[in-house]
Amino acid sequence: MARRTQQSCQDLTERTRIGSRLKYQRQKAGLSLRKVAALTEMSASTLCRLEAGIYLLSVNRLLTLARVLGCDPADVLGEPSHALQTNGVPHA
C-alpha cells in the first residue's frame, strides 16, 4: 500500500509540473484560458484543471495545445526535443 501511495504522489507531482509548464507556455503565448479554450474546443474549466495538475494531459490534448500555443510538446513535458526521438527519427 505504501508503494502505491508513493507512486500516486509522484504522479501528482509530475502532473503538477506539466500543468505549470502548460500554463507558462499559455502565458508566454499571451493567450487567456478562454482564448485557448475557443481555439482547442476544450472548456476553460478543463484547461484550468490541466494547468493545476488535477486532470491528466492526454497525448491528443498535448499535441493540440502545443500547436495552438506555438510550442513543441517537449516544452510542456519538460523533456528536451531529442528525448522524443527514436533511432534518430523525430516523432511527429
Image (tube, grey):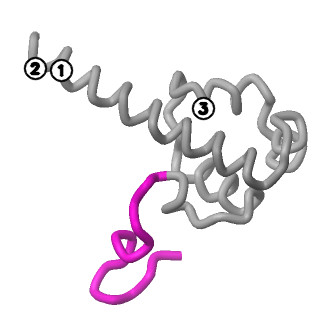
Any magenta on residue 58?
no
How many marks the image carries: the answer is 3
The amino acid at mark 2 is Arg
Above-or-below relation of 35 to 75? above
Q: Are marks 1 and 3 in contact (CB under 8 Å)?
A: no
Classify mark 2: helix, strand or loop.
helix
Q: Locate residue 20, reporting x and y percent.
A: 55, 37
Q: What crowding class fits label 1: few (fewer than 14 Cα within 10 Å), some (14-19), or many (20 or more)?
A: few
Q: Are marks 1 and 2 in contact (CB under 8 Å)?
A: yes
Please give the residue where the numbered disc 2 appears in the rendered image.
3
Residue 24 lies left or right of residue 70; in this view the side is left
Residue 4 lies left or right of residue 16; in this view the side is left
Any magenta on residue 79?
yes
Range shown magenta: 77-92
| Cα distance in 3D space between marks 3 and 2 | 25 Å
The amino acid at mark 3 is Leu
Q: Which mark is residue 50?
A: 3
Residue drawn at (69%, 52%) of the image: 65
